[in-house]
Amino acid sequence: MNGAESLVHTLVDGGVDVCFANPGTSEMHFVAALDRVAGMRSILALFEGVATGAADGFARMADRPAATLLHLGPGLVNGAANLHNARKASTPMVNVVGEHATHHMRYDAPLTADIEAMAAPVSNWVHTCVNASEVAADAARAVAAASTPPGQITTLILPANTAWEDADGPAVVPAIPERSQVSADAVSTAARVLRSGEPSVLLLTGQALRGPALELAGRIANATGSRVMAQGASARIERGAGRVAVERVPFVVDQALQVLDGVQHVILVGAKPPVAFFAYPGKPSMLTPEGCQMHRLAALGDDLDHALAWLADEVGAMDTPATLHQLGRPALPSGRLDKDSIAAVLGALIPDNAIVADESVTTGRGFFALTAGAPPHSWMNNTGGSIGLGLPLATGAAVACPERKVICLSGDGSAMYTIQALWTQARENLDVTTVVFSNRSYEILLGELAKVGAGNPGRTALDMLTLRQPDLNFVQMAAGMGVAGEQVDSCESFARALGRGLDSPGPYLVEVVI
Amino acid sequence: MNGAESLVHTLVDGGVDVCFANPGTSEMHFVAALDRVAGMRSILALFEGVATGAADGFARMADRPAATLLHLGPGLVNGAANLHNARKASTPMVNVVGEHATHHMRYDAPLTADIEAMAAPVSNWVHTCVNASEVAADAARAVAAASTPPGQITTLILPANTAWEDADGPAVVPAIPERSQVSADAVSTAARVLRSGEPSVLLLTGQALRGPALELAGRIANATGSRVMAQGASARIERGAGRVAVERVPFVVDQALQVLDGVQHVILVGAKPPVAFFAYPGKPSMLTPEGCQMHRLAALGDDLDHALAWLADEVGAMDTPATLHQLGRPALPSGRLDKDSIAAVLGALIPDNAIVADESVTTGRGFFALTAGAPPHSWMNNTGGSIGLGLPLATGAAVACPERKVICLSGDGSAMYTIQALWTQARENLDVTTVVFSNRSYEILLGELAKVGAGNPGRTALDMLTLRQPDLNFVQMAAGMGVAGEQVDSCESFARALGRGLDSPGPYLVEVVI
């Protein structure tokens, strides 16, 4: 058994059995090991940002890490923007990055780069293997580190000779730390605040947006007259009929200030204090009113179910029912497409148990209200703000959950960053319906330009914000990657096209021209 | 005048008047300044790897830096693979990377990242502006650093408030250091070696592969019985009829060892010692025979014209003519396309004064012989080994040289990394004919797998190396980005299609199915 085989064995034995790969020469022994070691599903991506974003989507839905296989420093940095996003989502992930053989590094060959330095800003854990016999143990530590709550990005750098030289055997992944239980102090502080009757928000993310934790938050809110909200972007929200509906903190600062106006206490349940995405002249960075107090009930890696159960008990909420959203779809609209009618079509058609990978940016800001009464579904957002995550995220989610329909909602600008994901969807016949909202612009920036006080854009500035001249055609691009699709420009045609995508078992693309 | 305006003014006054941009909120004041400050041509890219690769291509042809405009850390890392390539080419470049306002950084908003740490591995110079009044001076220093021979990657990080706050005015770019002159010792050592009659190679790159320097190298070779060769990959080679033909050090180790067999001295003229791209079990990292001596005549940033003139004088070569390649095109082949017949079509059709951006990987390894007699042209290779440079490089070269035809030669795997470049070519109506060689595989890796001793690939390994299931269709993808094209599968249809591309004044794509 060589080092690469000991690595793949260790990963598979440790429960990491999906790898999103874009390999090169230095990773050939890992690739060869896939033939010889059973149990690893390796999925080719044609660009590394697809691989890392897919690993993020996989882990968000599977609740366990996927691996990526990346080619030296440049392969890593091609995937680094989506590692940034995944790190902000506290996604568990094991990146395996090939490196020159140890004796070759000093020759400064073309691909030589400081991989550790490239990995550090987007990883929680970085290690370079020094010899073949330690590869298995290093990999086991990487899996354990990735799986440590709330989840970490680990990057294991594998010099080519440590892959091809003889190794012993696989290593066992060390015990993974349990989620910590919160302190009695944190619970009693939160309980005191809630009992005070002063306007309070329970701000949730992570595990608190799912299952029993979310319902407990709903009970607490009803028992104490407080509100439940989600962080501006969360890795995954369980929503729809039968679940507690949660509003997100809005992206637009003025809207966020309005939504949080009067709030005197924010109880952080895994979430971070609500801050503006960007600074704008004359606007605050903090979105809560002056004097509003932050109370941390639980950090993201804590046992949020337990924390909320304890708090519910403490405030006497265990017998108070949560308000669960009723099943109620909007009627299918007709005529012109706009943000509301698009949301209504989605609300009318999202199938039971669907997964939504949402990078719809400006078009999708209002999607929550009209989709809250759809059958139960999971909703994933971009937590790191680097666009180009949507299509890869959907790809990975579809690998994790082959029995569930995945709907990817993407802006046109966002979709162009990692459009190569469509090919992987075609190759793996993944059940993803991609909806691209073609407003032919970085529409968000047209608003941002004014908000930062940069005045009315002239022609030169506008050219940097519009995607016209020529118009992109996503249906043609998708066809070139083996994904069928169609372009629509009315509510009726959008509903028909989305229905066709949802009814077909493989990938499909709908370009919504607005 | 605000900080952003002072920055754009300073760049334009300093000769940096082209910017490849993919901006976001934090860059809006830079974008707005483009309306108010005359002289900057800003070109939108839909992915940052296109922007950085285009800036590389621009500088290689224009001999001066372009700027890029990138959105925070993730925007930078999206462009970092092509910054790696550009750094290995010693390309001058000024990256402007937006950052959160200084007062906003501590809030850990979604896009917050350690931009300096991300920039360092792919930059020669990194600086974060601390206030608006210093932005102009910082930019002037960045331009000077970028332009310092042989050329450097500079990254200027611009917090949003330093862009929008009041500044004084533009700053003047400090004097740029001259290229150094080589020492008498270096020249006399090289001369002694050449006069010894022992088998010697003049290994060239950079300025030595152009104009008078290249011809001087040819004179020296003829006068002393030595050989002239080019580094494995060089930023730009001036070649074709009337120029000294130079062979490159081959990529394949066994071929390189054979080509360099018996060589006792390598005289480095800007070049690095020839080393293998990767390490392979049982093969050397150094490509020269054991005991072969390296002699550095000149570093890449030295005055190579002067160094070669001095050496020519020292060895009495000034009156020896160089062997200049005769104009002589191969006949247009017919029938089946293979590597040789593709090379012959190129050799027959490359127009006078063309620019070739070559990332043809396996298909193109033999292109040099059959194109050496074409009319004079420039040839650019990937110096950093990170694929995804070809299409952006061609894009930037076409911006630098609007009067010259650009031919981009790309593998299918390479083209997929930065396929978004086609849209920028369409928008700017750039005169680029892109030829994609669709062998439906990472063909290079099929060879590499064997060479690293990983045995015969099974089905799982092969799946990671082939681009089939489904086949990509580059003509459809190009159409989706506004670039017309056609697919060909014979010498005749390739010649006709290439001719159509060369005859049309804008972008065109030919997919060669092999």
Image: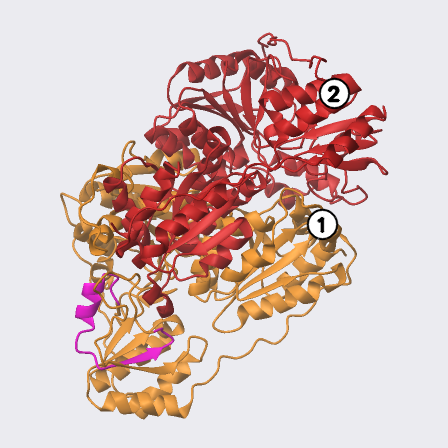
Chain colours: A red, B orange
Q: Quadrant of the N terminus of chain B?
A: bottom right
| Residue B360 in view here | no
Q: Amino acid at mark 1?
A: Arg
- Name the residue nearer the viewer: A142 or A182: A182
Residue pictured at 39% horizontal, 50% vertical: A137
Chain at numbered mark 2: A
Which circle marks residue A221 in the picture?
2
Image: magenta residue range:
B249-272
- Percent coordinates x, y for residue B147 in the rendering: 54, 70
SS of the residue under disc 1: helix
Residue pictured at 53% horizontal, 73% vertical: B148
Whether marks 1 and 2 lie on the same chain: no
The residue that label 1 is drawn on is B106
- Percent coordinates x, y for residue B302 in the rendering: 44, 79
- Name the residue nearer the viewer: A353 or A281: A353
* Circle 1 crowding by C-alpha within 10 Å: few under 14, some 14–19, many from 20: few
Task: Indicate the quadrant where residue A105 lies.
Answer: bottom left
